[in-house]
Image (cartoon, rainbow, N blue to C red):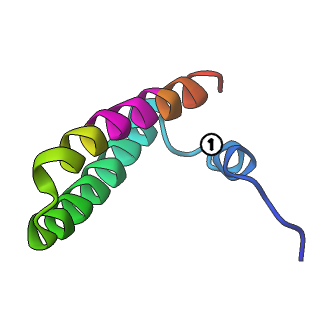
């Protein structure tokens, strides 16, 4: 079975509009942020790491949106 990258998979999904893909990417990042922040709150490390993780999540969301903008 051929291994497909994320960008190749996104190129095959031509039925979705670009704003729908950005909305989906934002939703995935928001869910991941909520899950990891909940884990850090349970472990007590939320004061330091959750802020860093939220900034990194926004950074990856910007990178992912820029990657989608090419299509």
Q: Is residue 59 magenta?
A: yes
Q: Is residue 18 above or below residue 28?
A: above
Residue 26 position, x and y percent, is 33, 42
Q: Is residue 60 left or right of residue 66?
A: left
Which quadrant of the rendered structure holds the C terminus? top right
Q: Check disc 1 and report its element: helix, strand or loop.
A: loop
Which residue is label 1 attached to?
A: 14
Residue at 62 percent across and 49 percent down: it is: 13
Which residue lies at the image location 25% right of the left edge and 49% below the top edge? 30
Q: Judge left or right: residue 13 versus residue 39.
A: right
Q: Is residue 51 above or below residue 63?
A: below
- Residue 43 lies in quadrant: bottom left
Most frequent secondary structure within the magenta stretch: helix
Residue at horizontal 26 percent and vertical 53 percent from the top: 33
Quadrant hosting residue 38: bottom left
For label 1, the crowd category at 10 Å Cα-Cα, with few meaning under 14, some 14 to 19 and many 20 or more, is few
Percent of width and height locating residue 28: 35, 54
The segment highlighted magenta reads 55-62
Q: Is residue 32 magenta?
A: no
Furthest residue in direction right, as rendered: 2
Choose between 10 and 60: the one closer to the eye.
60
Percent from the top left, x then y, of residue 50? Answer: 20, 48
Specify the farthest residue to the bottom.
1
- Could you say where residue 1 lies in the image, as x and y percent from the top left? 89, 77
């Amino acid at each position: 079975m051929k291994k497909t990258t994320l960008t190749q998979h996104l190129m095959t999904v031509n039925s979705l509009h670009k704003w729908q893909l950005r909305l989906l990417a934002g939703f995935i990042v928001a869910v991941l942020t909520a899950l990891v922040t909940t884990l850090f709150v349970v472990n007590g490390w939320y004061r330091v790491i959750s802020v860093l993780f939220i900034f990194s999540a926004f950074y990856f969301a910007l990178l992912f949106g820029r990657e989608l903008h090419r299509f």
